[in-house]
Image (spheres, rainbow, N blue to C red):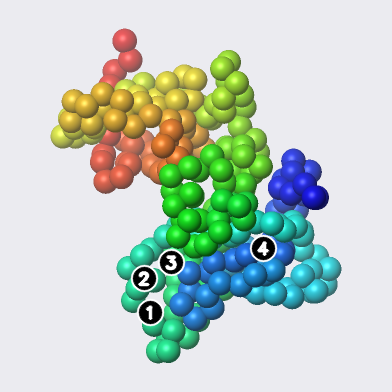
Amino acid sequence: MTEIFTPADLDAVLTGAARPLLLTDATVHTLNPVIGTMEHADVLIGAGLVVGVGPGIITAAEDDDAVVIRATGTTIIPAVLDISAMLAHAPHTEGPGTAGSGTLTPGVPAHLAVLDDADAPDLPTALRTSLTDPGRLRAVLRDGVPIAWGGTVLAPSSRHPATTDADGGVAGRVDPDRVGVWIDTEDFLHQELTADGRYDETRGGRAHAYQGRYWIDGERIDYLDDLGFWAFGQFDGDTLHHAGYTMRRKDVR
């Protein structure tokens, strides 16, 4: 069986970032009630959006100068789920373009996850595996940009593999000026950003409520929790905004 989602594939995607990206020959669960699920289908991505979904797109790949990644033996699902949006649309009353967030409808942001078919024999199993065992994901793309590939987490803002820490894990990108403990205005959330690219949250006095890696790129901070979910925040001068909290850094001793 041909190896898929290899380091060479990743290099092709990163070096061809300005070109369309085509994932080909996969089972695709669009979660769009009109488009549905397709086998041996392709997902075309351009400018961070899903451009097309369906069988046969690969026939125009050369014309479009697309980077082609063979996804045979895998299942592709949305990486962002919006259950309320899915339930709000019925296939006999709405066209395919009406379903947006949480689907792989052409025109929506290209947030998607890729699993082996063996881990995704049906849609419920695929969703359950992606949520409870993210280590089994073959690839994850956000806005068409790989943030995980071949089982390796990538630095989400740099679009390059993260550095390796002393324990062999993936270390985050650190801004030394922002290392320290950040505390929200209500003294409920304490978030420690450490110099080794890790974060540790105390919530309402509950220590280690969330822990994981972080990456800082300019004014943005991305978090990858050890439980497998992503989050982000934004720096604004001496404040950090994250998940509705406004935090300031505690004086460094």
Q: Which x, y percent locates residue 253? A: 31, 10
Question: Marks 2/4: CA distance?
Answer: 24 Å
On residue 89, the disc is 1
First in sequence, mark 2 or 4: give its number.
4
Name the residue tied to disc 2. 85
Amino acid type shown at disc 1: His
On residue 101, the disc is 3
Question: Marks 3/2: CA distance?
Answer: 7 Å
Question: Marks 3/4: CA distance?
Answer: 21 Å
Name the residue tied to disc 4. 26
Q: Residue at x 52, y 75 (%)?
A: 36
Amino acid type shown at disc 3: Ser
Q: Secondary structure at mark 4?
A: strand
Q: Is residue 22 visible?
A: no
Amino acid type shown at disc 2: Ala
Question: Marks 1/2: CA distance?
Answer: 7 Å
Q: Secondary structure at mark 3?
A: loop
